[in-house]
């Protein structure tokens, strides 16, 4: 990483970053991407469920049709 940051040569940086990716792909058991996807499953009659931004489902303004 330090070698890639220290050079202005684009080709050298690309090779260095590709090698870093190969090392991570080979050695990392799990890589955190800092993005979570949340799903909620309900019957079609449930309306007004707010978009999920965490694992808490806010149904305070929801209703059944």
Image: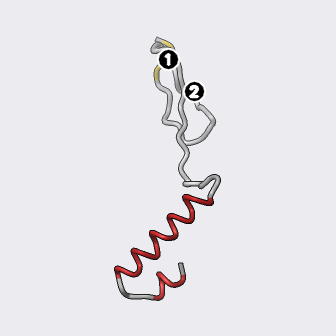
Percent position of residue 51, x then y: 48, 36
- Could you classify mark 1 by the number of other residues whose Cα lies within 10 Å: few (under 14), some (14-19), or many (20 or more)? few
Residue name at image x 42 percent, y 75 percent: 15
- Residue 60 is marked as none
Q: Nearer the viewer, residue 20 or 52?
A: 20
Residue name at image x 51 percent, y 18 percent: 63
Residue occupied by mark 1: 46
Question: Mark 1 touching mark 2, by CB under 8 A?
Answer: yes
Considering every residue shown, the one lying at the far left of the view is: 10
Number of numbered discs on residues: 2
Dot 1 falls on a residue whose secondary structure is: strand
Percent position of residue 31, x then y: 59, 55
Percent position of residue 28, x then y: 62, 58
Q: Nearer the viewer, residue 34 or 27?
A: 27
Q: Quadrant of residue 25?
A: bottom right
Q: Earlier in the sequence, mark 1 or mark 2?
A: 1
The correct choice, above or below, for 52 with respect to 36 in the image is above
Q: Nearer the viewer, residue 43 or 16?
A: 16
The correct choice, above or below, for 63 with respect to 34 in the image is above
Percent position of residue 61, x then y: 53, 27
Dot 2 falls on a residue whose secondary structure is: loop
The correct choice, above or below, for 7 with respect to 60 in the image is below
Residue occupied by mark 2: 59
Q: Nearer the viewer, residue 58 or 36?
A: 36
């Amino acid at each position: 990483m330090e070698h890639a940051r220290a050079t202005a040569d684009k080709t050298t940086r690309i090779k260095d970053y590709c090698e870093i990716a190969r090392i991570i792909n080979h050695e990392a058991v799990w890589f955190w991407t800092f993005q979570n996807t949340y799903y909620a499953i309900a019957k079609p009659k449930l309306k007004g469920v707010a978009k999920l931004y965490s694992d808490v489902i806010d149904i305070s303004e929801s209703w059944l049709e």
